Image (tube, rainbow, N blue to C red):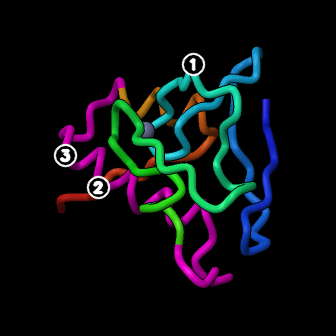
Amino acid sequence: MERVAEDVFGERIVFHADEDGNYYCPVCGLLWESTADWPPYSFALNLEHCLDCSTHIGNEDIEIPFNPNNPAPERWARLRRAWLEKHGWDPVLIARVEQRLRVRVDMPSDN
Ligand SMILES: [Zn+2]
């Protein structure tokens, strides 16, 4: 399912969640089971670290002031690429991301 939030700068952000409404980390797709009040974007800063990719959600993944040319999906994609790079582009992680966040992961070509 999708849950929509608006951050303090007026950016409309779509998060993915499981059928119980628990959010997936928008960077790595980890299920955040203990965060019913997530996402952080309706208030100033939530500052929760993802337990897998360690992204500081509400801090590292925002740009102040909001830049419409750098929307949330692109900011997350950059963080995601760095995280996947660190994990050697593990196909299990790529599959998790693609399934839970409904994004396509383009692996870097090494030609
Ligand atoms: Zn994460």
Percent coordinates x, y for residue 31 in the rendering: 53, 23
Quarter for ligand 1?
A: top left
Toward which corner of the image does residue 93 lie, by quadrant?
Answer: top left
- Badge 3 crowding class, 10 Å Cα cut-off, few under 14, some 14 to 19, many 20 or more, is few
Do the residues bearing badges 2 and 3 touch, measured as CB atoms within 8 Å? yes
Please report the residue visible at 29 percent of the width from the left and 55 percent of the height from the top.
Answer: 82
Quadrant occupied by the C terminus: bottom left
As drawn, which residue projects farthest toward the top? 20
- Mark 2 = which residue? 82
Disc 3 or disc 1, which is closer to the eye?
Answer: 1
| Labels 1 and 2: the sequence-earlier one | 1
* Disc sitting over residue 49 in the figure: none
In-front residue for pair 49/26: 49
Label 3 to label 1: alpha-carbon separation = 24 Å
Residue 81 included in the magenta stretch of the image: yes
- Mark 1 = which residue? 33
Considering only vertical position in the picture, is 79 above or below 86?
A: below
Label 2 to label 3: alpha-carbon separation = 6 Å
- Mark 3 = which residue? 86
Percent coordinates x, y for residue 52 in the rendering: 34, 32
